[in-house]
C-alpha cells in the first residue's frame, strides 16, 4: 500500500465496514499506517476500540452502527462528513463477513 501525505487533512477518507472483525481490524490498521483517514464501522462499539489505539481523532473515527440498515448507513456517512469536515468517504471497503464480530 502506498504511503500518503503526512497531513491528515490532505489524505482520503476510507470507510471500513465490519471493522471489528480480525480482517476489518487488519484492513483499517493497514490503511491508517499508509496515511489514510479511516471511518471504522461495526455493530459493536467494543470491537472498534483496538483500532483507535495510537491514532489521533483526526486520523480515525469509530462508529457503532449496522450499515446494512439504510438509515444507519446514511447517519454514518453524515457523521463521517461532520467529523472530517469534507465530502463523504471516498472509498468503501467491506471486511470478510464470514468472521462476524457478532459472536
Image (tube, rainbow, N blue to C red):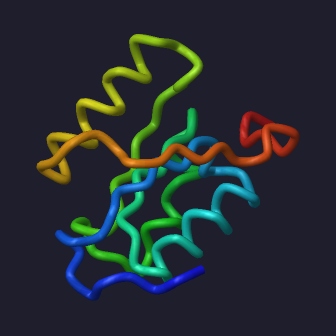
Rendered view: 33 above or below 89: below
Residue 89 screen position, x and y as percent: 35, 45
From the viewer's perspective, is 54 left or right of 103? left
The residue at the point 22 percent across, 67 percent down is 58
What quarter of the picture does the C terminus occupy?
top right
Residue 71 screen position, x and y as percent: 39, 11
What quarter of the picture does the N terminus occupy?
bottom right
From the viewer's perspective, is 33 left or right of 25? left
Count of numbered badges drawn on the protein? 0
The front one of 75 and 7 is 7
The residue at the point 47 percent across, 12 percent down is 70
From the viewer's perspective, is 50 left or right of 99? left
Rendered view: 99 above or below 66: below
Residue 5 screen position, x and y as percent: 29, 84
The residue at the point 45 percent across, 37 percent down is 64
From the viewer's perspective, is 90 left or right of 70? left
The residue at the point 43 percent across, 54 percent down is 14
Residue 62 screen position, x and y as percent: 39, 51
Amino acid at each position: 500500500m502506498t504511503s500518503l501525505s503526512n497531513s491528515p487533512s490532505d489524505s482520503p477518507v476510507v470507510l471500513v465496514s465490519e471493522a471489528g472483525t480480525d480482517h476489518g481490524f487488519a484492513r483499517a490498521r493497514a490503511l491508517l499506517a499508509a496515511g489514510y483517514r479511516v471511518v471504522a464501522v461495526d455493530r459493536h462499539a467494543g470491537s472498534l476500540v483496538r483500532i483507535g489505539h495510537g491514532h489521533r481523532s483526526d486520523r480515525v473515527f469509530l462508529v457503532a452502527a449496522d450499515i446494512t440498515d439504510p438509515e444507519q448507513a446514511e447517519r454514518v456517512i453524515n457523521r463521517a462528513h461532520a467529523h472530517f469536515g469534507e465530502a463523504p468517504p471516498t472509498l468503501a471497503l467491506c471486511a470478510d463477513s464470514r468472521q462476524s464480530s457478532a459472536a
